[in-house]
Amino acid sequence: MIRPATVSDAERIAALWNDMIRDSLATFTTEEKTVSATRQLIQERSDAFWVIDEEGDCDLGFVTYGPFRAGPGYAATVEHTIILGPSAQGRGYGRQLMTHAVAAAAAQGHHVMVAGISSANPAAVAFHRALGFRQTGHMPEVGRKAGQWLDLILMQKTLQAP
């Protein structure tokens, strides 16, 4: 079941996020998320933050979106983050979360959703392509993590208002 994230989910969401930060090249950041900052983000994005909840277990994954860039000219464009826990991989939860987030963003009047994907994560490129995102940019070696230069792949989807 997909439900809105609540501040009581912050510890589990931060743990999922931090596992990805520590253990993968899927994000360029090395700064882990604090529970406090995660709580604040959930509150700030109360209409744009959801978890997969299976019998009270929200460790499966989450999706959220927020501003793509600052300034009024970008107000209709959002960038998302989706993270699935290991037990959620390959079970269709990612597709469910993204379908929900895309529909919600469109209903809120957003026009475009952007995905910024590490070149070290080709599965994410294929996932987004299957959901109708198209590659619109490739920025070679703009990220660095674990002693490696990483490319940033930009994908986007034009949203359809309901």
Image: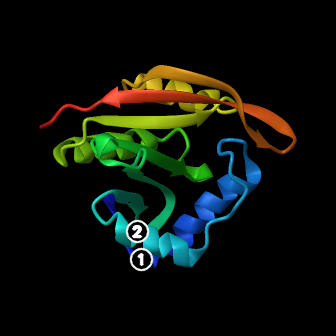
Residue 38 appears in the picture as rendered: yes
Taking the image as shown, residue 105 lies to the left or right of residue 58, namely: left
Q: Residue at x 19, y 31 (%)?
A: 160
Q: Name the amino acid type tagged 2.
A: Ile
Q: Which residue is mark 2?
A: 42
**Percent position (x, y) of residue 83?**
53, 50
Give the image quarter of residue 77.
Answer: top left
Q: Residue at x 25, y 35 (%)?
A: 111
Q: Is residue 29 above or below residue 79?
A: below
Q: Residue at x 12, y 37 (%)?
A: 162
Q: Residue at x 52, y 29 (%)?
A: 154
Taking the image as shown, residue 64 lies to the left or right of residue 3, namely: right
Q: Nearer the viewer, residue 123 or 159?
A: 159
Mark sitting earlier along the chain (2/1)? 1
**Percent position (x, y) of residue 132?**
36, 23
Q: Nearer the viewer, residue 98 or 52?
A: 98
Taking the image as shown, residue 80 lies to the left or right of residue 126, namely: left
Q: Name the amino acid type tagged 1.
A: Val
**Percent position (x, y) of residue 2?**
33, 56
Q: Is residue 89 above or below residue 85?
A: above
Mark 1: few/some/many CA within 10 Å (<14, 14-19, 20+): some
**Percent position (x, y) of residue 99?**
32, 40
Q: On the rendered image, what quadrant is the N terminus found in?
A: bottom left
Residue 1 appears in the picture as rendered: no
Q: Residue furthest left?
A: 162
The secondary element bearing badge 1 is classed as helix
Give the image quarter of residue 30.
Answer: bottom right
Q: Is residue 142 above or below residue 100?
A: above
Residue 7, numbered circle: 1
Residue 154, numbered circle: none
Q: How far separated are the C-alphas under marks 2 and 1?
A: 6 Å
Is the Cβ of the residue at disc 2 closer than 8 Å to that at disc 1?
Answer: yes
